[in-house]
Amino acid sequence: MECVATKSAISKPLSFRNIPLRLVIGAFPGNSRPRLEWGIAVIAFENVAYNYGGGELLSDISLRLAPGSFHFLTGPSGAGKTTFLKLCYAELLPTAGHVTIFDHDVHGLTRDDVAMTRRRIGVVHQDCQFLDHLPLSANIALPLMVAGRAAPQGDLSDLMGWVGLDRLAHSLPPQLSGGERQRAALARAIITGPDVILADEPTGNLDWDMSLRLLTLLVELNRMGKTVVVATHDLNLIRQAKSLTAARVLRIAKRRIQLAGADL
Amino acid sequence: MSLQLTLPPQITRLLQHRIFHASPADSVVPPSGHTAWLTSFTAGAMTFLAVFALALSLASGRLAERWAGALDRTATVRIAAASGQIDAQTKAVLAVLATTPGIASARALGDDEQRKLLEPWFGPNLPVESLPLPRLIEVTEDGSGYDAEGLRQRLTAEAPGAVFDDHTRWRKPLATAASRLRLLGWLAIALIGLTMAAMITLAANASLAANAQVIGVLRLVGARDSYIARAFVRRFTLRAFAGAAAGALGGMLGVALLPSADAAGAFMTGLGFHGAGWLLPLVLPPLAGLVAFAATRAAAFRKLRELH
Ligand SMILES: Nc1ncnc2c1ncn2[C@@H]1O[C@H](COP(=O)(O)OP(=O)(O)O)[C@@H](O)[C@H]1O
Ligand SMILES: [Mg+2]
Protein backbone atom coordinates (compact mmCIF):
# COMPACT_ATOMS: atom_id res chain seq x y z
CA MET A 1 0.00 0.00 0.00
CA GLU A 2 1.32 3.38 -0.90
CA CYS A 3 0.46 6.67 0.66
CA VAL A 4 -0.75 8.89 -2.07
CA ALA A 5 -3.70 11.08 -2.93
CA THR A 6 -4.82 11.57 0.61
CA LYS A 7 -5.54 14.98 2.00
CA SER A 8 -4.17 14.15 5.42
CA ALA A 9 -0.78 13.40 3.91
CA ILE A 10 -0.67 16.89 2.47
CA SER A 11 -1.78 18.71 5.56
CA LYS A 12 0.70 17.03 7.90
CA PRO A 13 3.94 16.40 6.13
CA LEU A 14 6.82 15.11 8.21
CA SER A 15 9.85 17.27 8.02
CA PHE A 16 13.49 17.18 8.93
CA ARG A 17 15.42 20.46 9.02
CA ASN A 18 12.68 22.01 6.95
CA ILE A 19 13.11 19.37 4.26
CA PRO A 20 9.86 17.48 3.90
CA LEU A 21 10.08 13.75 4.45
CA ARG A 22 7.68 11.16 3.24
CA LEU A 23 7.02 7.64 4.29
CA VAL A 24 6.74 5.44 1.26
CA ILE A 25 5.63 1.89 1.65
CA GLY A 26 5.70 -0.47 -1.23
CA ALA A 27 6.26 2.15 -3.89
CA PHE A 28 8.43 -0.32 -5.74
CA PRO A 29 7.04 -3.79 -6.29
CA GLY A 30 9.40 -6.41 -4.91
CA ASN A 31 10.58 -4.03 -2.24
CA SER A 32 7.93 -3.76 0.44
CA ARG A 33 10.15 -2.33 3.15
CA PRO A 34 9.05 1.10 4.23
CA ARG A 35 11.57 3.79 3.48
CA LEU A 36 11.91 7.49 3.92
CA GLU A 37 12.24 9.62 0.86
CA TRP A 38 13.20 13.23 0.37
CA GLY A 39 10.74 15.62 -1.18
CA ILE A 40 7.00 15.80 -0.95
CA ALA A 41 5.90 14.26 -4.22
CA VAL A 42 6.83 14.28 -7.85
CA ILE A 43 3.65 16.13 -8.68
CA ALA A 44 1.30 17.58 -6.08
CA PHE A 45 -2.07 19.30 -6.47
CA GLU A 46 -3.38 21.46 -3.67
CA ASN A 47 -6.99 22.68 -3.93
CA VAL A 48 -6.55 22.98 -7.66
CA ALA A 49 -9.32 24.20 -9.93
CA TYR A 50 -9.27 24.62 -13.67
CA ASN A 51 -11.58 26.60 -15.87
CA TYR A 52 -11.36 27.10 -19.64
CA GLY A 53 -13.67 30.08 -19.33
CA GLY A 54 -17.05 28.36 -19.26
CA GLY A 55 -17.32 27.26 -15.65
CA GLU A 56 -15.04 25.07 -13.59
CA LEU A 57 -14.05 21.78 -15.19
CA LEU A 58 -12.00 20.59 -12.22
CA SER A 59 -12.59 21.78 -8.66
CA ASP A 60 -10.72 21.57 -5.40
CA ILE A 61 -8.39 18.77 -6.42
CA SER A 62 -5.76 17.77 -3.89
CA LEU A 63 -3.52 14.83 -4.52
CA ARG A 64 0.10 13.88 -4.77
CA LEU A 65 1.85 11.49 -7.07
CA ALA A 66 4.57 9.70 -5.16
CA PRO A 67 7.84 8.89 -6.90
CA GLY A 68 7.61 5.44 -8.40
CA SER A 69 3.81 5.28 -8.27
CA PHE A 70 1.65 3.94 -11.10
CA HIS A 71 -1.76 5.49 -11.63
CA PHE A 72 -4.50 5.06 -14.13
CA LEU A 73 -6.80 7.98 -14.76
CA THR A 74 -10.33 7.16 -15.85
CA GLY A 75 -13.56 9.01 -16.30
CA PRO A 76 -16.15 9.73 -18.95
CA SER A 77 -15.15 11.50 -22.09
CA GLY A 78 -14.95 15.24 -21.50
CA ALA A 79 -14.46 14.79 -17.75
CA GLY A 80 -11.09 16.53 -17.86
CA LYS A 81 -8.49 13.74 -18.08
CA THR A 82 -6.48 15.52 -20.73
CA THR A 83 -6.83 18.78 -18.83
CA PHE A 84 -5.53 17.11 -15.66
CA LEU A 85 -2.50 15.76 -17.49
CA LYS A 86 -1.80 19.17 -19.02
CA LEU A 87 -1.78 20.64 -15.52
CA CYS A 88 0.78 17.96 -14.62
CA TYR A 89 3.31 19.14 -17.20
CA ALA A 90 2.66 22.87 -16.94
CA GLU A 91 0.97 23.15 -20.31
CA LEU A 92 -1.90 24.70 -18.36
CA LEU A 93 -1.64 26.67 -15.14
CA PRO A 94 -4.34 26.12 -12.49
CA THR A 95 -6.94 28.86 -12.23
CA ALA A 96 -7.01 28.30 -8.47
CA GLY A 97 -4.84 26.41 -6.01
CA HIS A 98 -1.29 25.19 -6.52
CA VAL A 99 0.33 22.60 -8.73
CA THR A 100 3.82 21.62 -7.65
CA ILE A 101 6.10 19.74 -10.02
CA PHE A 102 9.37 18.39 -8.62
CA ASP A 103 8.86 20.64 -5.60
CA HIS A 104 8.40 23.80 -7.67
CA ASP A 105 5.12 25.69 -7.89
CA VAL A 106 4.27 25.97 -11.58
CA HIS A 107 3.28 29.60 -11.13
CA GLY A 108 6.88 30.43 -10.32
CA LEU A 109 8.43 28.62 -13.28
CA THR A 110 10.14 30.65 -15.99
CA ARG A 111 9.89 29.53 -19.62
CA ASP A 112 13.30 27.89 -19.31
CA ASP A 113 12.24 26.19 -16.08
CA VAL A 114 9.21 24.74 -17.87
CA ALA A 115 11.49 23.42 -20.62
CA MET A 116 13.85 21.83 -18.12
CA THR A 117 10.90 20.34 -16.22
CA ARG A 118 9.55 18.78 -19.41
CA ARG A 119 12.86 17.03 -19.98
CA ARG A 120 12.05 15.05 -16.86
CA ILE A 121 8.47 14.32 -17.94
CA GLY A 122 7.66 12.14 -20.94
CA VAL A 123 4.27 12.98 -22.40
CA VAL A 124 2.19 10.91 -24.81
CA HIS A 125 -0.31 13.37 -26.24
CA GLN A 126 -3.79 12.23 -27.14
CA ASP A 127 -3.33 13.84 -30.55
CA CYS A 128 0.28 12.80 -31.09
CA GLN A 129 2.04 15.56 -32.96
CA PHE A 130 5.39 15.17 -34.66
CA LEU A 131 7.77 17.12 -36.82
CA ASP A 132 6.29 16.04 -40.12
CA HIS A 133 9.42 16.76 -42.16
CA LEU A 134 11.68 14.50 -40.10
CA PRO A 135 11.77 10.70 -40.31
CA LEU A 136 10.27 8.75 -37.44
CA SER A 137 13.64 7.81 -35.93
CA ALA A 138 14.63 11.48 -35.71
CA ASN A 139 11.24 12.30 -34.18
CA ILE A 140 11.67 9.65 -31.54
CA ALA A 141 15.17 10.91 -30.75
CA LEU A 142 13.94 14.53 -30.68
CA PRO A 143 13.90 14.92 -26.88
CA LEU A 144 17.56 13.90 -26.84
CA MET A 145 18.37 16.27 -29.66
CA VAL A 146 16.83 19.33 -28.01
CA ALA A 147 18.71 18.43 -24.82
CA GLY A 148 21.95 18.33 -26.80
CA ARG A 149 22.30 14.57 -26.55
CA ALA A 150 22.20 11.72 -29.05
CA ALA A 151 20.98 8.17 -28.68
CA PRO A 152 23.29 5.27 -29.53
CA GLN A 153 21.89 4.14 -32.88
CA GLY A 154 21.56 0.50 -31.84
CA ASP A 155 19.56 1.28 -28.73
CA LEU A 156 17.26 3.57 -30.67
CA SER A 157 16.43 0.85 -33.16
CA ASP A 158 15.92 -1.67 -30.34
CA LEU A 159 13.37 0.63 -28.77
CA MET A 160 11.67 1.14 -32.13
CA GLY A 161 11.65 -2.61 -32.63
CA TRP A 162 9.99 -3.15 -29.27
CA VAL A 163 7.12 -0.84 -30.17
CA GLY A 164 6.94 -2.43 -33.62
CA LEU A 165 8.20 0.52 -35.61
CA ASP A 166 11.62 -0.70 -36.75
CA ARG A 167 10.50 -0.94 -40.35
CA LEU A 168 9.15 2.58 -40.28
CA ALA A 169 12.30 4.29 -39.00
CA HIS A 170 12.68 6.25 -42.22
CA SER A 171 9.00 6.98 -42.79
CA LEU A 172 7.59 10.45 -42.30
CA PRO A 173 4.94 10.83 -39.56
CA PRO A 174 2.07 11.75 -41.94
CA GLN A 175 2.48 8.31 -43.53
CA LEU A 176 1.70 6.51 -40.25
CA SER A 177 -1.55 5.05 -38.95
CA GLY A 178 -3.09 6.26 -35.70
CA GLY A 179 -1.76 3.26 -33.79
CA GLU A 180 1.72 3.70 -35.21
CA ARG A 181 1.69 7.34 -34.19
CA GLN A 182 0.71 6.40 -30.64
CA ARG A 183 3.53 3.89 -30.36
CA ALA A 184 5.98 6.40 -31.76
CA ALA A 185 4.74 9.01 -29.29
CA LEU A 186 5.33 6.58 -26.43
CA ALA A 187 8.82 5.77 -27.67
CA ARG A 188 9.56 9.50 -27.92
CA ALA A 189 8.18 10.10 -24.42
CA ILE A 190 10.44 7.53 -22.77
CA ILE A 191 13.64 7.85 -24.78
CA THR A 192 15.31 10.16 -22.28
CA GLY A 193 14.39 7.90 -19.37
CA PRO A 194 12.24 10.61 -17.76
CA ASP A 195 11.28 10.58 -14.09
CA VAL A 196 7.59 10.85 -14.91
CA ILE A 197 5.60 9.42 -17.81
CA LEU A 198 2.19 10.87 -18.59
CA ALA A 199 0.25 8.98 -21.25
CA ASP A 200 -3.10 10.20 -22.58
CA GLU A 201 -5.03 7.20 -23.93
CA PRO A 202 -1.87 5.65 -25.36
CA THR A 203 -3.59 2.43 -26.41
CA GLY A 204 -6.70 4.00 -27.92
CA ASN A 205 -5.92 2.81 -31.44
CA LEU A 206 -3.96 -0.34 -30.64
CA ASP A 207 -4.87 -4.02 -30.72
CA TRP A 208 -4.54 -6.01 -27.52
CA ASP A 209 -1.17 -7.45 -28.42
CA MET A 210 0.41 -4.09 -28.97
CA SER A 211 -1.37 -2.62 -25.95
CA LEU A 212 0.31 -5.30 -23.83
CA ARG A 213 3.69 -4.47 -25.26
CA LEU A 214 3.27 -0.81 -24.39
CA LEU A 215 1.99 -1.71 -20.94
CA THR A 216 5.06 -3.89 -20.39
CA LEU A 217 7.23 -0.96 -21.28
CA LEU A 218 5.39 1.29 -18.83
CA VAL A 219 5.51 -1.32 -16.07
CA GLU A 220 9.22 -1.85 -16.65
CA LEU A 221 9.81 1.89 -16.42
CA ASN A 222 7.76 1.95 -13.24
CA ARG A 223 9.94 -0.81 -11.81
CA MET A 224 12.95 1.38 -12.46
CA GLY A 225 11.33 3.94 -10.21
CA LYS A 226 9.61 6.15 -12.76
CA THR A 227 6.25 7.68 -11.89
CA VAL A 228 3.57 6.73 -14.40
CA VAL A 229 0.11 8.16 -15.07
CA VAL A 230 -2.01 6.65 -17.83
CA ALA A 231 -5.36 8.10 -18.85
CA THR A 232 -7.42 5.29 -20.34
CA HIS A 233 -10.87 3.83 -20.84
CA ASP A 234 -9.51 0.33 -21.26
CA LEU A 235 -10.55 -1.70 -18.20
CA ASN A 236 -8.77 -4.79 -19.48
CA LEU A 237 -5.55 -2.84 -19.60
CA ILE A 238 -6.05 -1.67 -16.01
CA ARG A 239 -6.74 -5.23 -14.85
CA GLN A 240 -3.68 -6.51 -16.63
CA ALA A 241 -1.53 -3.78 -15.11
CA LYS A 242 -2.80 -4.56 -11.63
CA SER A 243 -1.61 -8.11 -12.05
CA LEU A 244 1.87 -6.80 -12.79
CA THR A 245 2.35 -3.86 -10.50
CA ALA A 246 0.81 -1.86 -7.71
CA ALA A 247 -1.25 0.33 -9.99
CA ARG A 248 -3.91 2.60 -8.52
CA VAL A 249 -6.92 4.03 -10.29
CA LEU A 250 -7.93 7.68 -10.12
CA ARG A 251 -11.37 8.50 -11.33
CA ILE A 252 -12.60 11.91 -12.44
CA ALA A 253 -16.28 12.45 -11.76
CA LYS A 254 -18.28 15.58 -11.04
CA ARG A 255 -15.21 17.80 -11.28
CA ARG A 256 -13.40 15.86 -8.56
CA ILE A 257 -10.74 13.18 -8.62
CA GLN A 258 -11.19 10.17 -6.39
CA LEU A 259 -9.12 7.10 -5.73
CA ALA A 260 -11.25 4.27 -7.10
CA GLY A 261 -11.89 1.14 -5.07
CA ALA A 262 -9.61 -1.87 -5.29
CA ASP A 263 -12.42 -3.98 -6.71
CA LEU A 264 -12.16 -2.52 -10.18
CA MET B 1 -3.68 -14.45 -17.20
CA SER B 2 -0.06 -13.52 -16.79
CA LEU B 3 2.22 -11.62 -19.00
CA GLN B 4 5.21 -13.38 -20.52
CA LEU B 5 6.79 -10.37 -22.10
CA THR B 6 10.12 -9.08 -20.83
CA LEU B 7 12.05 -6.16 -22.21
CA PRO B 8 15.29 -6.88 -24.05
CA PRO B 9 18.32 -5.73 -22.06
CA GLN B 10 19.31 -3.11 -24.63
CA ILE B 11 16.10 -1.19 -24.06
CA THR B 12 16.55 -1.42 -20.32
CA ARG B 13 20.04 -0.05 -20.83
CA LEU B 14 18.77 2.80 -22.97
CA LEU B 15 16.20 3.73 -20.38
CA GLN B 16 18.59 3.46 -17.44
CA HIS B 17 21.77 5.00 -18.73
CA ARG B 18 22.17 8.46 -20.01
CA ILE B 19 25.39 8.26 -21.94
CA PHE B 20 24.81 10.38 -24.99
CA HIS B 21 26.73 12.72 -27.23
CA ALA B 22 25.78 16.26 -28.08
CA SER B 23 24.43 16.79 -31.57
CA PRO B 24 23.79 20.27 -32.90
CA ALA B 25 20.86 20.42 -35.26
CA ASP B 26 18.79 23.09 -36.91
CA SER B 27 16.97 20.47 -38.96
CA VAL B 28 14.11 20.69 -36.45
CA VAL B 29 12.68 23.57 -38.47
CA PRO B 30 11.26 22.41 -41.79
CA PRO B 31 12.69 24.04 -44.89
CA SER B 32 10.11 26.62 -45.88
CA GLY B 33 10.25 27.44 -49.57
CA HIS B 34 9.05 30.97 -50.06
CA THR B 35 10.42 32.62 -46.93
CA ALA B 36 13.83 31.12 -47.67
CA TRP B 37 13.71 32.47 -51.19
CA LEU B 38 12.41 35.85 -50.02
CA THR B 39 15.20 36.23 -47.47
CA SER B 40 17.99 35.35 -49.89
CA PHE B 41 16.52 37.50 -52.62
CA THR B 42 16.01 40.51 -50.34
CA ALA B 43 19.51 40.26 -48.94
CA GLY B 44 20.92 39.87 -52.47
CA ALA B 45 19.01 42.79 -53.99
CA MET B 46 19.68 45.06 -51.03
CA THR B 47 23.39 44.28 -51.03
CA PHE B 48 23.54 44.86 -54.79
CA LEU B 49 22.11 48.35 -54.20
CA ALA B 50 24.38 48.89 -51.22
CA VAL B 51 27.45 48.24 -53.39
CA PHE B 52 26.42 51.13 -55.66
CA ALA B 53 25.61 53.37 -52.73
CA LEU B 54 29.03 52.54 -51.33
CA ALA B 55 30.73 53.32 -54.64
CA LEU B 56 28.82 56.60 -54.82
CA SER B 57 29.84 57.49 -51.29
CA LEU B 58 33.50 56.75 -51.89
CA ALA B 59 33.59 58.58 -55.22
CA SER B 60 31.86 61.69 -53.93
CA GLY B 61 34.11 61.55 -50.89
CA ARG B 62 37.15 61.64 -53.17
CA LEU B 63 35.60 64.46 -55.16
CA ALA B 64 34.81 66.52 -52.08
CA GLU B 65 38.32 66.09 -50.76
CA ARG B 66 39.93 67.00 -54.04
CA TRP B 67 37.90 70.16 -54.48
CA ALA B 68 38.10 71.23 -50.91
CA GLY B 69 41.77 70.32 -50.51
CA ALA B 70 43.88 70.83 -53.62
CA LEU B 71 42.26 74.07 -54.71
CA ASP B 72 41.89 75.34 -51.21
CA ARG B 73 44.79 77.75 -51.08
CA THR B 74 44.86 78.97 -54.69
CA ALA B 75 43.22 81.60 -56.78
CA THR B 76 43.88 82.96 -60.29
CA VAL B 77 44.13 86.34 -61.92
CA ARG B 78 43.29 86.43 -65.57
CA ILE B 79 44.62 89.32 -67.67
CA ALA B 80 42.90 89.92 -70.98
CA ALA B 81 44.15 92.97 -72.83
CA ALA B 82 45.58 94.08 -76.16
CA SER B 83 48.81 92.15 -76.73
CA GLY B 84 50.99 95.21 -76.18
CA GLN B 85 49.57 95.87 -72.75
CA ILE B 86 49.58 92.37 -71.31
CA ASP B 87 53.13 92.40 -70.02
CA ALA B 88 52.77 95.80 -68.38
CA GLN B 89 49.50 94.84 -66.72
CA THR B 90 50.99 91.52 -65.56
CA LYS B 91 53.80 93.39 -63.84
CA ALA B 92 51.34 95.78 -62.21
CA VAL B 93 49.20 92.90 -60.97
CA LEU B 94 52.21 91.04 -59.57
CA ALA B 95 53.26 94.21 -57.78
CA VAL B 96 49.80 94.65 -56.25
CA LEU B 97 49.74 90.99 -55.17
CA ALA B 98 53.23 91.23 -53.63
CA THR B 99 52.01 93.98 -51.29
CA THR B 100 48.72 92.38 -50.39
CA PRO B 101 48.62 90.89 -46.88
CA GLY B 102 47.49 87.23 -46.86
CA ILE B 103 49.00 86.36 -50.23
CA ALA B 104 51.98 84.03 -49.95
CA SER B 105 53.12 84.09 -53.56
CA ALA B 106 52.03 84.96 -57.07
CA ARG B 107 53.42 83.61 -60.30
CA ALA B 108 52.60 84.15 -63.96
CA LEU B 109 52.18 80.89 -65.89
CA GLY B 110 54.60 80.49 -68.80
CA ASP B 111 53.53 79.62 -72.35
CA ASP B 112 54.39 75.94 -71.81
CA GLU B 113 52.16 75.68 -68.79
CA GLN B 114 49.32 77.43 -70.59
CA ARG B 115 49.69 75.09 -73.52
CA LYS B 116 49.45 72.13 -71.18
CA LEU B 117 46.24 73.45 -69.67
CA LEU B 118 44.67 73.83 -73.10
CA GLU B 119 46.00 70.60 -74.54
CA PRO B 120 42.98 68.47 -73.62
CA TRP B 121 40.80 70.77 -75.66
CA PHE B 122 42.98 71.84 -78.56
CA GLY B 123 45.66 69.19 -78.93
CA PRO B 124 49.43 69.37 -78.34
CA ASN B 125 50.59 71.72 -81.11
CA LEU B 126 48.68 74.82 -80.21
CA PRO B 127 50.56 78.02 -81.20
CA VAL B 128 49.93 79.74 -77.90
CA GLU B 129 52.15 82.72 -78.79
CA SER B 130 50.03 83.75 -81.74
CA LEU B 131 46.70 83.50 -79.98
CA PRO B 132 45.11 86.37 -78.06
CA LEU B 133 44.98 84.29 -74.88
CA PRO B 134 44.67 85.86 -71.48
CA ARG B 135 47.70 85.59 -69.23
CA LEU B 136 47.14 83.52 -66.07
CA ILE B 137 48.65 84.34 -62.69
CA GLU B 138 48.52 81.68 -60.02
CA VAL B 139 47.99 83.09 -56.55
CA THR B 140 48.72 81.12 -53.38
CA GLU B 141 47.26 82.25 -50.07
CA ASP B 142 49.23 81.97 -46.89
CA GLY B 143 46.27 80.73 -44.92
CA SER B 144 45.66 83.85 -42.82
CA GLY B 145 43.01 85.09 -45.26
CA TYR B 146 42.86 88.26 -47.36
CA ASP B 147 40.34 90.87 -48.35
CA ALA B 148 39.09 89.59 -51.71
CA GLU B 149 36.84 92.59 -52.41
CA GLY B 150 39.58 95.18 -51.64
CA LEU B 151 42.05 93.27 -53.80
CA ARG B 152 39.57 93.15 -56.63
CA GLN B 153 39.14 96.95 -56.54
CA ARG B 154 42.87 97.64 -56.41
CA LEU B 155 43.46 95.28 -59.35
CA THR B 156 40.81 97.02 -61.44
CA ALA B 157 42.46 100.36 -60.73
CA GLU B 158 46.01 99.19 -61.58
CA ALA B 159 45.22 96.78 -64.45
CA PRO B 160 41.86 97.25 -66.15
CA GLY B 161 42.19 93.89 -68.00
CA ALA B 162 42.66 91.84 -64.81
CA VAL B 163 39.94 89.56 -63.47
CA PHE B 164 40.47 88.09 -60.04
CA ASP B 165 39.00 84.59 -59.68
CA ASP B 166 39.30 83.10 -56.20
CA HIS B 167 37.54 79.82 -57.13
CA THR B 168 35.36 79.91 -54.03
CA ARG B 169 32.51 81.10 -56.20
CA TRP B 170 32.18 77.75 -57.86
CA ARG B 171 34.39 75.56 -55.73
CA LYS B 172 32.48 75.89 -52.48
CA PRO B 173 29.06 74.79 -53.70
CA LEU B 174 30.67 71.92 -55.58
CA ALA B 175 32.61 70.73 -52.57
CA THR B 176 29.45 71.06 -50.48
CA ALA B 177 27.45 69.13 -53.04
CA ALA B 178 30.07 66.40 -53.15
CA SER B 179 30.10 65.94 -49.41
CA ARG B 180 26.28 66.00 -49.36
CA LEU B 181 26.37 63.29 -51.97
CA ARG B 182 28.72 61.25 -49.79
CA LEU B 183 26.37 61.70 -46.84
CA LEU B 184 23.44 60.62 -49.00
CA GLY B 185 25.42 57.52 -49.99
CA TRP B 186 25.92 56.53 -46.37
CA LEU B 187 22.30 57.34 -45.59
CA ALA B 188 21.25 55.10 -48.47
CA ILE B 189 23.37 52.27 -47.07
CA ALA B 190 21.79 52.73 -43.63
CA LEU B 191 18.28 52.76 -45.16
CA ILE B 192 19.09 49.66 -47.19
CA GLY B 193 20.22 47.94 -43.98
CA LEU B 194 17.05 48.95 -42.15
CA THR B 195 14.84 47.84 -45.02
CA MET B 196 16.62 44.50 -45.09
CA ALA B 197 16.13 44.14 -41.33
CA ALA B 198 12.42 44.92 -41.71
CA MET B 199 11.92 42.47 -44.58
CA ILE B 200 13.82 39.72 -42.79
CA THR B 201 11.81 40.36 -39.63
CA LEU B 202 8.61 39.94 -41.64
CA ALA B 203 9.90 36.76 -43.25
CA ALA B 204 11.03 35.39 -39.88
CA ASN B 205 7.67 36.20 -38.30
CA ALA B 206 5.85 34.49 -41.15
CA SER B 207 8.09 31.47 -40.79
CA LEU B 208 7.60 31.31 -37.01
CA ALA B 209 3.83 31.60 -37.39
CA ALA B 210 3.76 28.92 -40.07
CA ASN B 211 5.73 26.64 -37.76
CA ALA B 212 3.56 27.05 -34.66
CA GLN B 213 2.95 23.30 -34.54
CA VAL B 214 6.67 22.55 -34.80
CA ILE B 215 7.34 24.98 -31.97
CA GLY B 216 4.61 23.31 -29.91
CA VAL B 217 6.19 19.88 -30.40
CA LEU B 218 9.64 21.23 -29.55
CA ARG B 219 8.40 22.85 -26.36
CA LEU B 220 6.58 19.67 -25.40
CA VAL B 221 9.80 17.67 -25.54
CA GLY B 222 11.68 20.24 -23.47
CA ALA B 223 13.28 22.58 -25.99
CA ARG B 224 14.22 25.94 -24.57
CA ASP B 225 13.38 29.18 -26.38
CA SER B 226 17.06 29.71 -27.11
CA TYR B 227 17.25 26.32 -28.86
CA ILE B 228 14.17 26.98 -30.98
CA ALA B 229 15.28 30.52 -31.77
CA ARG B 230 18.74 29.29 -32.73
CA ALA B 231 17.30 26.95 -35.32
CA PHE B 232 15.48 29.85 -37.01
CA VAL B 233 18.27 32.38 -36.53
CA ARG B 234 20.95 30.10 -38.00
CA ARG B 235 18.85 29.48 -41.03
CA PHE B 236 17.97 33.11 -41.72
CA THR B 237 21.51 34.30 -41.07
CA LEU B 238 22.98 31.79 -43.51
CA ARG B 239 20.38 32.58 -46.15
CA ALA B 240 20.91 36.33 -45.81
CA PHE B 241 24.67 35.86 -45.96
CA ALA B 242 24.47 33.72 -49.09
CA GLY B 243 22.06 36.12 -50.79
CA ALA B 244 24.18 39.11 -49.82
CA ALA B 245 27.35 37.43 -51.10
CA ALA B 246 25.72 36.94 -54.50
CA GLY B 247 24.39 40.52 -54.43
CA ALA B 248 27.80 41.94 -53.51
CA LEU B 249 29.54 40.02 -56.30
CA GLY B 250 26.89 41.19 -58.77
CA GLY B 251 27.27 44.78 -57.61
CA MET B 252 31.07 44.66 -57.82
CA LEU B 253 30.86 43.20 -61.29
CA GLY B 254 28.47 46.01 -62.26
CA VAL B 255 30.85 48.65 -60.90
CA ALA B 256 33.85 47.03 -62.59
CA LEU B 257 32.03 47.06 -65.93
CA LEU B 258 31.16 50.77 -65.73
CA PRO B 259 32.87 52.74 -68.55
CA SER B 260 36.17 54.20 -67.42
CA ALA B 261 35.98 57.81 -66.25
CA ASP B 262 39.58 58.61 -67.29
CA ALA B 263 38.51 60.67 -70.30
CA ALA B 264 37.04 63.25 -68.00
CA GLY B 265 39.84 62.67 -65.53
CA ALA B 266 40.47 66.18 -64.31
CA PHE B 267 36.84 66.75 -63.37
CA MET B 268 35.32 63.35 -62.55
CA THR B 269 37.06 60.82 -60.39
CA GLY B 270 34.75 58.10 -61.60
CA LEU B 271 32.21 55.91 -59.83
CA GLY B 272 34.19 52.90 -58.73
CA PHE B 273 36.55 51.35 -56.24
CA HIS B 274 40.29 51.89 -56.24
CA GLY B 275 42.87 49.45 -54.92
CA ALA B 276 42.01 48.35 -51.39
CA GLY B 277 38.61 49.99 -51.86
CA TRP B 278 37.56 46.79 -53.63
CA LEU B 279 37.68 45.05 -50.24
CA LEU B 280 34.96 47.30 -48.83
CA PRO B 281 31.97 45.69 -50.62
CA LEU B 282 33.17 42.36 -49.21
CA VAL B 283 32.25 43.68 -45.77
CA LEU B 284 28.60 43.88 -46.85
CA PRO B 285 27.68 40.12 -46.77
CA PRO B 286 28.87 39.59 -43.17
CA LEU B 287 27.09 42.81 -42.29
CA ALA B 288 23.90 41.50 -43.93
CA GLY B 289 24.32 38.26 -41.96
CA LEU B 290 24.67 40.28 -38.79
CA VAL B 291 21.53 42.29 -39.58
CA ALA B 292 19.61 39.06 -40.29
CA PHE B 293 20.93 37.50 -37.08
CA ALA B 294 19.79 40.42 -34.93
CA ALA B 295 16.44 40.81 -36.69
CA THR B 296 15.56 37.10 -36.59
CA ARG B 297 16.69 36.70 -32.99
CA ALA B 298 14.54 39.59 -31.81
CA ALA B 299 11.57 38.35 -33.85
CA ALA B 300 11.97 34.76 -32.62
CA PHE B 301 12.05 35.57 -28.92
CA ARG B 302 9.13 37.95 -29.28
CA LYS B 303 7.07 35.41 -31.22
CA LEU B 304 7.93 32.52 -28.89
CA ARG B 305 6.61 34.46 -25.92
CA GLU B 306 3.42 35.17 -27.87
CA LEU B 307 2.96 31.52 -28.82
CA HIS B 308 2.81 30.54 -25.10
N1 LIG C 1 -8.76 24.59 -25.09
C1 LIG C 1 -10.00 24.41 -24.62
N2 LIG C 1 -10.85 25.45 -24.56
C2 LIG C 1 -12.10 25.30 -24.08
N3 LIG C 1 -12.60 24.13 -23.64
C3 LIG C 1 -11.81 23.05 -23.69
C4 LIG C 1 -10.47 23.14 -24.17
N4 LIG C 1 -9.92 21.90 -24.09
C5 LIG C 1 -10.88 21.10 -23.57
N5 LIG C 1 -12.00 21.77 -23.34
C6 LIG C 1 -13.22 21.24 -22.75
O1 LIG C 1 -12.94 20.73 -21.48
C7 LIG C 1 -13.62 19.53 -21.26
C8 LIG C 1 -12.65 18.46 -20.83
O2 LIG C 1 -11.76 18.18 -21.88
P1 LIG C 1 -10.64 17.07 -21.75
O3 LIG C 1 -9.77 17.44 -20.62
O4 LIG C 1 -10.01 16.93 -23.06
O5 LIG C 1 -11.49 15.79 -21.36
P2 LIG C 1 -11.14 14.25 -21.53
O6 LIG C 1 -9.68 14.15 -21.87
O7 LIG C 1 -11.47 13.64 -20.22
O8 LIG C 1 -12.01 13.72 -22.60
C9 LIG C 1 -14.33 19.18 -22.54
O9 LIG C 1 -15.68 19.52 -22.37
C10 LIG C 1 -13.71 20.06 -23.56
O10 LIG C 1 -14.65 20.47 -24.51
MG1 LIG D 1 -8.75 13.48 -23.47
Image (cartoon, rainbow, N blue to C red):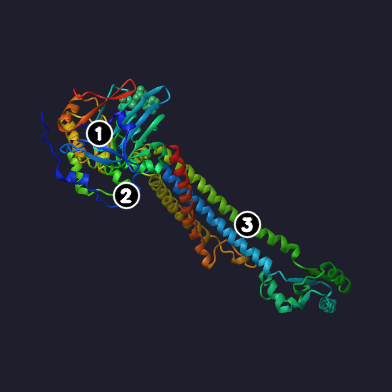
SS for dot 2: loop
Give ligand 2's quarter of the image.
Answer: top left
Q: Disc 1 is attached to a residue of which chain?
A: A
Tag in front: 2 or 3 = 2
Q: Which mark is residue A148?
A: 2
Q: Position of residue B241 (x, y in %)?
A: 44, 53
Q: Which mark is residue A182?
A: 1
Which residue is at a point 20% across and 27% down the rendered structure image?
A238
Which amino acid, by three-letter code, is at mark 1? Gln
Q: Quadrant of residue B150?
A: bottom right
**Which of disc 2 and disc 1 is earlier in sequence?**
2
Question: Is ligand 1 closer than 8 angstroms to the Cβ of mark 2?
Answer: no
- Mark 1: secondary structure: helix
Q: Position of residue A70 (x, y in %)?
A: 23, 33
Mark 3 Cα shell of 10 Å, populated few (<14), some (14-19), many (≥20) = some
Q: Quadrant of the N terminus of chain A?
A: top left
Q: Left or right: where does residue A136 sit relative to residue B159?
A: left
Asked if labels 3 and 1 touch by Cβ distance under 8 angstroms, the answer is: no
Q: Is B172 situated above or below B129?
A: above
